[in-house]
Image (cartoon, helix red, strand yellow):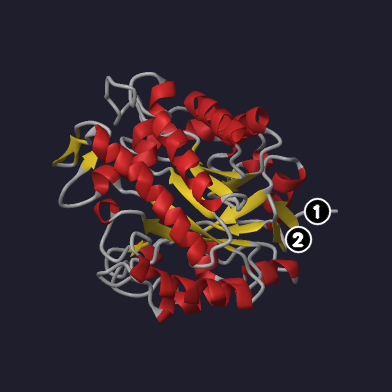
Amino acid sequence: MSHLFESYRIRGLSLRNRFMRSATTSYWADEEGIVKDAHVRLYRSLARGGVGLIVKGHLYVADNGKAHTGMAGISSDTQIPMLRKLTDAVHEQGGRIVAQINHAGVVHQPDRAGPSEYSEGGWTAREMTVDEIEAAIQAYGDAAERAMQAGFDGVQIHGAHGYLVSQFLSRHVNRRTDRWGGSLENRMRFLMEVYDEVRGRVGNEPVLIKMNCDDFSPDGFTVDDSVKAAVAIAKKGIDLIEVSGGGRGQQEALRARARHSDPALADLAFAGHASKIRDATRPTPMALVYGFRKLDTMRKAVDMGLTDMVSMSRPFIREPDLVERLQSGQREVSCIRCDACSGSDVFGKTMLRCHLE
């Protein structure tokens, strides 16, 4: 009997199944970072469709941490009322939702700043001062407190995909020689202090992290680093680790090293690395994202203990009611990963939706 459709608990939060909607930005907030009614309708539909845990697309914790135009924020009390409307809509449908909080670091424009001076694609970011680092940590805590005020069921720290936490973890980006850089212990310091700040604000509510299993860069954050960081954050008390991958300086050819040797898990891009993290951090709950297409693969990943939760993004864009469909007999997702939903001609110009006709 598969555990996939059974209820599951993260700390004190009861979920109706093992499906997780991974954080997905819509590029559709207003210039003040306030979400719109279209966002409310989107998240209501996900909750109505039966998703066990929804992660709200990333929210910037400080105005100087905004990653792109249209990114929603949680840096000001003025953003709380519409976020509360969104969480209310999810709860009315019996769903659970956590806020993913994030800081862009070197990606923010016009004042790009990160762990150390860093250049990429024709631009250069400056090194953050110690005061700026400490202010960023405080901003994560303030954001977590606002998330509670907005009715979220918990918080996910975005520690992946080349944003600020990921930048500090990466030796490719973080070239500092003070207590914030150098050894892995020092490079983890920013994450650990962010966690402490967030935990201090939310108390016993769930705190999750999304982290890379590998940056897939020649000199960045490796799976060995990831295992050590995951063990450290698990000992701190993190409530769930969502495993993803890909950071600054990533190279497509290096992604193959994260694959699993089991042919039945071939679709899951990070399954091999995830198994190493899983073995080191058990019994801390884990979610795995990227590549889930077939119901049989989802069942195997959960039943064999590779992951506790099946995390997906694009499939839920096409089918917000995917969980209900799978439970009713559908054998795989309908999304063909054409990436039209993220194309430059639509991303940020229309509300997040499937463009496959």
Vertical position of residue 144 compared to residue 268: above or below: below
Tell me which amino acid carries mark 2: Phe
**Nearer the observer, 21 or 75:** 75
Q: Secondary structure at mark 1?
A: loop
Q: Residue 313: x, y in percent?
A: 51, 59
Q: Residue 113: x, y in percent?
A: 21, 41
Instruction: Report the label total.
Output: 2
Vertical position of residue 306 compared to residue 16: above or below: above
Classify residue 355 as left or right of residue 181.
right
Classify residue 25 as left or right of residue 208.
left
Tag 1 and tag 2, C-beta contact below 8 Å: yes
Q: Residue 278: x, y in percent?
A: 64, 34
Label placed on residue 2: 1
Q: Secondary structure at mark 2?
A: loop
Residue 98: quarter of image: bottom right
**Nearer the observer, 78 or 158:** 78
Classify residue 20 as left or right of residue 156.
right
Classify residue 159 as left or right of residue 103.
right
Residue 58: quarter of image: bottom left
Vertical position of residue 233 compared to residue 4: above or below: above
Say which residue label 2 marks.
5
Residue depicted at 39% across the width and 34% down the height: 190
Residue depicted at 25% across the width and 47% down the height: 107
Q: Is residue 320 visible?
A: no
Tell me which amino acid carries mark 1: Ser
Residue depicted at 29% across the width and 72% down the height: 30
Residue depicted at 52% across the width and 56% down the height: 22
